[in-house]
Structure formats: C-alpha cells, structure tokens
C-alpha cells in the first residue's frame, strides 16, 4: 500500500519536473531568438554622418533652386579634405564613400530654407552603408584587400575623415520614418508598417462583421440540413488551407477577374479577410455554443425573439471568446507574407502609402525583401524590422487580453 | 379507464388550460401519448412521475418551448382560454409573454438583480417610465419574497446571490411580466430544504393570482403545494385528480405504488 503511494507521488513529481523543464526550454529558446535579434539589429539604429562645409556664397536665388548643382557643391566640399586626390577614378571612389542621398537631402533642405543661399554653412550628410559598417567595426581589415568591400585607399580616407572630428554617429531617423530604398542607409520600415496597418484595417472591417454574422446565422437561424453541414465542413477545411492558396485566389479573382490594381492594401486586406474569416467563424460559433443553454431558455421563456436572444444574451456573453478569436486571426494575418507576395505587395515601394489604394508593402514582406538583399547592412535592418513586427504583435495580443478582461461575464 | 380519467378531469375551478389528445414526438420516438388534461385557473397543479415519463415535455408544450428543439413535433390541441396555442396565427413570442417559466436550475441573466427583474417589462415595452419600472421591480421582488434580502443589492449581479435567492429572483423575473400562468420545472431540485420551504410558501401565496403548474420529483412537495395532481408514466397520463385523493386513495395500482414509494 505505502509503496503504491510513494510511486504515485514520484510519478506526479516527475510529471511536474517535465513540465517545468519544457517551460524553461521554451523560455530559453525565446530569449535566444529575441536576444540575437536585438544584438543583430544594433547597427541598424544609428548611422555615421559627416558635417560637410557647404559653400553657397557664389550662388544666388536667380539661378533657380532646382537648377543648382548640389552634387557638385557636395563633391567639392568633400574633396577639399583631400587635395592630393586628383585622378578621376579616385575622385569617383571618394565620392562613393558618402551616401548618394546627400545630394537630395541638401536639395530638399535648401528648398525649404532658401535663406541659406549665398551663405557658407555646415550640412550633415550620411555615409554610405559600407563606410558606416567600417566605422562600426564590422569591416575586417586583416582580410586581403580584394576580399573586402572597402580597399586600402578608401580605408585610409575614412580614417582621415574621422580625424577631422566632423564624423558623428547619429540615430538613424530614416529607419523609422522612411519607406524602402535601394540604399540601406536610407531604407526604413515606416512605409511597410503603414501598409500593414492599412491592410489589417481592411481585414478587420471586412472579416469581423461578416464572420460574426455568418457564425450567428449558422448557429442560431440556419436549418440543419445537408447544405449547412456541407458549408460547415468547408469552413473548417478553409481554416487549414495554406495561406498561399488564398494569395492565388486573390490574384485570380480580385486582380485578374475584377481588375483591381496590384500591390494595394485593399486587395491585400481582401485576401487576408478570406484567410481570417474561417478562424473568426469557428471562434464565434464555439463561443456561442459555450454560453449556457439555460440562459437562452430563460430569455426565450420570457418572450424574447430569437434575434433578441442573440443580441441581448448570447453575443454579450460570447464577446470575450469572439474577440480573442478575431485577434488571433488578425495577428496571424498581420504576420502573413505569402499571399501578399502573389498579389504584388512585394513590389519595391519608396512612398509611404496613405490610402487603401496606394501601392504598399507589408512588414513581413519588407522583412522578406531585406533578408533577400545582398548588402551587408540589410542584415541589421531585417532584425530591426522583425523586432518591430514582434512588438506590434505583442501589442495586438495585449489588446486581446484587455478586451477579454473587460467583457468577461461572471457566472 | 378512460372513463375514470374523464371523470377526474372535472375540476372545481374553471379550466384555463385544456389539452386534448396531445402527442409529442422526438424524431420518430413518441414521448407523450394522447394526453387529456385540464388545468384549473388559480390553483396549483403538480405533475409527478418517474424520470423520463414526459412530465417536463408536457410542461414545455404549454409555452411552446418545445419549438426550440428541431426534432420535436407536437400533435393534438392545447387551448389556453379557449385559444388554440398551436394555431398557425399564434405569435409564440406573444404567447410566452403571457406565461412565466421557472427552470430546474436557477438561471438568472448575468446582469444586475434589478435588470433581471426589469428585463421582461422592458422587453415587451410595457413600462416605459423609470419610476413605474422601479415600482414594478420592487413589487415583483416583494411578491417573490426576496425584496427584504436584496433591496440594498439591486445593482449586484444576479448570479452573486445564493441558490435559493437566485431561484426566487427567477420567480420574480417571471411574475414581472404579469403572466396568467406560471410553469415550474422542478424549481426546488437544486435547493436545500430551507430554500425549498421558502419557495413552497411562495407558491402557496402566488396561487391566489396565478395558475401554477409544477413538475416535481418530491411527493411531499406535490402533497404540500398542489390542489390537483397528475401522475405520468411512460408518456401516458395514468391518473389525475384532487391531490388528497391521489395520495390517499388513488384509483390505479401504479399510482399507489408510486406515491407510496414502492416504485419509481
């Protein structure tokens, strides 16, 4: 008898230990993933810049702001540090150390502040991604020259520039405020984030009402027969269909048949709605079923109509479950990239979208694009964008928890 | 036997509910066989019988709660005040607004005590003024013998009350719509003896104003609260008559076996 008891206690303790161990394992894995993401993303948040002395004393407003040779001005400012560089090819090489965006940022700055014309002033320009990585110590100088992105000459120049005291490491506003770009130092994830948010808004607006109403109809009003059984089986089936199939469907139906534009959040939202609908329908039906039947009977016996029973009793009690299901569905849609690739939301889009029909990309797709890019600097950007995606998902799930708490019914 | 049944069906009070040849089927299974039963106005009729004998099914025919079950089919005629309630022109929602129902397990809505009682009057748009509604809630709770216990807790959820209080809240909720009939489906089966005694007292008081039909498993309860008793067995109405007669000298052996506890 005693032996039997000790055996049972041992088995119980062993089971607890297994559970604890798997929890620790999962937590460690998560910590490693997030930790490595954070570590890898560090170079993305800052960018090395240089204050160049811009000489506009010989230029007047009459020349026309757009016709000023901004590129020439920046070039001469940069070359003034290196009077010994004379050959054409060396000059080209030297100019390539700073970002090609410098010309446009200076132009935009002068356009907004025409009073600087005719003056001499310092202007902060970005280094190109390779120079930036050199300053951050990611270029291994011990490697043979032809295996590096920067040759010895360029490294000497960069060290020389560093000696002037004009080189500074600054927070990279571009990362947070820009759309995509071919130049890693200019590229940002704001465009993709907005694209994702617009897409998910379309998804929410379509799938939540349609899904909940469908579930209510199937659960409370539809006559149970072969057709409704068939529909039910299909809905459950759709929830398991790979997302890329929905992308193909969207391409065939929305774009090719209805002639909707490519790469727009509206179509993205439609496709993701198709994907989210089964999840919402199933979650809503389950929540409706879990409302005690006694409540339904009580309301019916009081003389409530079927619709009043649904909207006054079943729906309020089922709300926490419905919201949880919806948000889980939306979170899945938010992190989805495959169907968006097929409807063209993988396009290279520099502008930040503002409406449902502006070309856009989404955060997961942006991560895919960056991860696929050859430039070394995109590695850090990919990690940074991933962290943003994870943070947004945490926020969405937090909203789910709060909403559930708020609407929870105590029996 | 049918003759006897007919004789017993003659009741002192005017019959409010008249049932003729009521058959109920669940899909192909017949649950009730030709029930002929009259229920008198402003008295308590108890339905007794072993589990699965169809007494609850019969009760639910009276306010057409069986309509909710897809596979359930009701045949025969049930008249309330000479109106056939299974006639196609009858509005079920309107019918149910005239009949209150109390269930086996207390089932208050997950709303405040006040909102539970105010639900019916508001639902049917009978009381629009806030003061009138307050009065109605108080009166209903008083009639259900709950007012003194909950008058300071009106805004608390109905589900926070004790089991017996919840059941009386459900009774208050049912009488708030001023029904002519109250149906009770084993209202005390989930309650302790003290709460049961309170409910029984309440039923006794309510019979002056309402026609009450109660399904019960407790013989003593049937004897205590009802004026008439109907004994069901295997979907058939075996015997109906004055409660005293059913318990003292029933005509049928089966009834006697059941009420004396030798069977069932």
Image (tube, coloured by chain):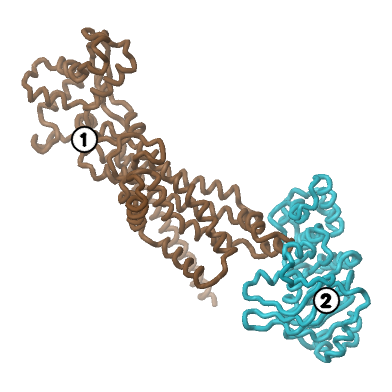
Circle 2 residue: B18
Image side of residue A146 versus residue B159, left or right: left
Q: Residue at x 53, y 58 (%)?
A: A214
In this rendering, which labeled residue sits more in front, label 2 or label 1? Answer: 2
Quickly name the residue at label 1: A138
Query: What is the quadrant of the C terminus of chain B in the image?
Result: bottom right
Q: CA distance from mark 2 to mark 1?
A: 94 Å
In this orientation, which residue lies closer to the viewer: A173 or B120? B120
Q: Is residue B113 visible?
A: no
Which chain does the residue under circle 1 lie in? Answer: A
**Residue A380: image x %, image y %?**
28, 39
**Does A174 sit above or below residue B27?**
above
The residue at the point 78 percent across, 72 percent down is B84
Q: Give the quadrant of residue A311.
A: bottom right
Q: State whether residue A351 appears in this view.
A: yes
Q: Quadrant of the N terminus of chain B?
A: bottom right
Residue A217, percent from left and from top: 56, 61
The residue under the point 75% across, 57% down is: B161
Q: Which residue extends farthest right?
A: B12
View extreme (left): residue: A87
Q: Residue at x 24, y 24 (%)?
A: A102
Residue A404 pos. (x, y %): 56, 50
Q: Which chain is cyan?
A: B
- Chain identifier matching the brown colour in the rendered picture: A
């Amino acid at each position: 008898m005693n032996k039997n008891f000790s055996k049972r206690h041992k088995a119980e303790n062993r089971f607890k230990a297994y559970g604890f161990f798997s929890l620790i394992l999962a937590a460690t894995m998560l910590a490693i993933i997030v930790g490595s993401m954070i570590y890898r993303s560090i170079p993305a948040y800052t960018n090395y810049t240089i204050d160049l002395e811009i000489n506009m004393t010989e230029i007047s407003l009459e020349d026309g702001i757009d016709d000023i040779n901004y590129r020439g001005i920046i070039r001469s400012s940069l070359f003034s540090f290196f009077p010994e560089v004379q050959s054409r090819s060396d000059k080209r090489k030297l100019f390539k150390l700073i970002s090609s965006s410098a010309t446009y940022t200076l132009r935009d700055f002068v356009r907004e502040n025409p009073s600087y014309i005719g003056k001499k002033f310092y202007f902060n320009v970005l280094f190109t991604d390779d120079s930036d990585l050199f300053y951050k110590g990611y270029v291994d100088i011990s490697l043979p020259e032809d295996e590096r992105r920067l040759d010895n000459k360029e490294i000497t120049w960069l060290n020389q520039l560093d000696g002037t005291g004009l080189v500074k490491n600054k927070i990279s506003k571009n990362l947070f405020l820009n759309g995509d770009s071919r130049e890693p130092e200019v590229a940002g994830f704001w465009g993709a984030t907005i694209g994702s948010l617009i897409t998910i808004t379309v998804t929410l607006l379509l799938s939540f009402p349609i899904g909940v109403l469908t579930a209510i109809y199937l659960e409370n009003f539809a006559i149970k027969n072969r057709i409704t059984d068939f529909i039910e089986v299909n809905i459950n089936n759709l929830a398991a269909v790979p997302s890329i199939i929905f992308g193909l469907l969207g391409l065939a139906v929305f774009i090719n048949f209805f002639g909707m534009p490519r790469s727009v959040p509206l179509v993205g939202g439609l496709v993701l709605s198709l994907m989210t609908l089964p999840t919402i329908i199933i979650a809503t039906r389950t929540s409706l079923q879990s409302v005690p039947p006694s409540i339904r009977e009580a309301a019916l016996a009081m003389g409530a109509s079927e619709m009043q029973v649904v909207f006054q009793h079943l729906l309020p009690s089922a709300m926490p479950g419905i919201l949880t299901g919806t948000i889980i569905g939306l979170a899945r849609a938010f992190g989805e990239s495959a169907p968006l690739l097929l409807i063209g939301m993988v396009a290279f889009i520099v502008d930040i979208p503002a409406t449902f029909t502006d070309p856009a990309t989404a955060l997961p797709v942006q991560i895919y694009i960056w991860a696929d890019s050859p430039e070394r600097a995109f590695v850090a950007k990919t990690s940074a964008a991933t962290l943003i995606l994870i943070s947004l998902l945490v926020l969405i799930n937090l909203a789910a928890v709060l909403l559930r708490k708020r609407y929870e019914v105590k029996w | 036997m049918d003759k006897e049944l007919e004789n017993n069906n003659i009741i002192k009070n005017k019959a409010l509910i008249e049932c003729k040849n009521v058959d109920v089927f669940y899909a192909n299974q017949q649950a009730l066989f030709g029930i002929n039963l009259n229920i008198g106005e402003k008295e308590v009729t108890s339905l007794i019988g072993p589990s699965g004998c169809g007494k609850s099914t019969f009760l639910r025919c009276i306010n057409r709660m069986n309509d909710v079950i897809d596979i359930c089919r009701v045949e025969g005629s049930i008249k309330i005040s000479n109106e056939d309630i299974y006639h196609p022109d009858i509005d079920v929602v309107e019918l149910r607004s005239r009949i209150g129902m109390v269930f086996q397990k207390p089932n208050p809505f997950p709303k405040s005590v006040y909102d539970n009682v105010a639900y019916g009057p508001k639902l049917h748009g009978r009381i629009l003024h806030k003061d009138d509604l307050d009065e109605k809630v108080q009166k209903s709770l008083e009639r259900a013998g709950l007012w003194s216990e909950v008058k300071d807790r009106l805004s608390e959820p109905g589900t926070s009350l004790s089991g017996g209080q919840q059941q009386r809240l459900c009774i208050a909720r049912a009488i708030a719509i001023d029904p002519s009939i109250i149906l009770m489906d084993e209202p005390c089966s989930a309650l302790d003896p003290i709460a049961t005694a309170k409910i029984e007292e309440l039923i006794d008081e309510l019979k002056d104003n309402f026609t009450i039909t109660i399904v019960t498993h407790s013989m003593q309860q049937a004897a205590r609260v009802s004026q008439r008793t109907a004994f069901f067995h295997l979907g058939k109405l075996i015997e109906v008559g004055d409660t005293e007669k059913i318990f003292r000298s029933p005509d049928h052996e089966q009834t006697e076996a059941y009420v004396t506890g030798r069977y069932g």
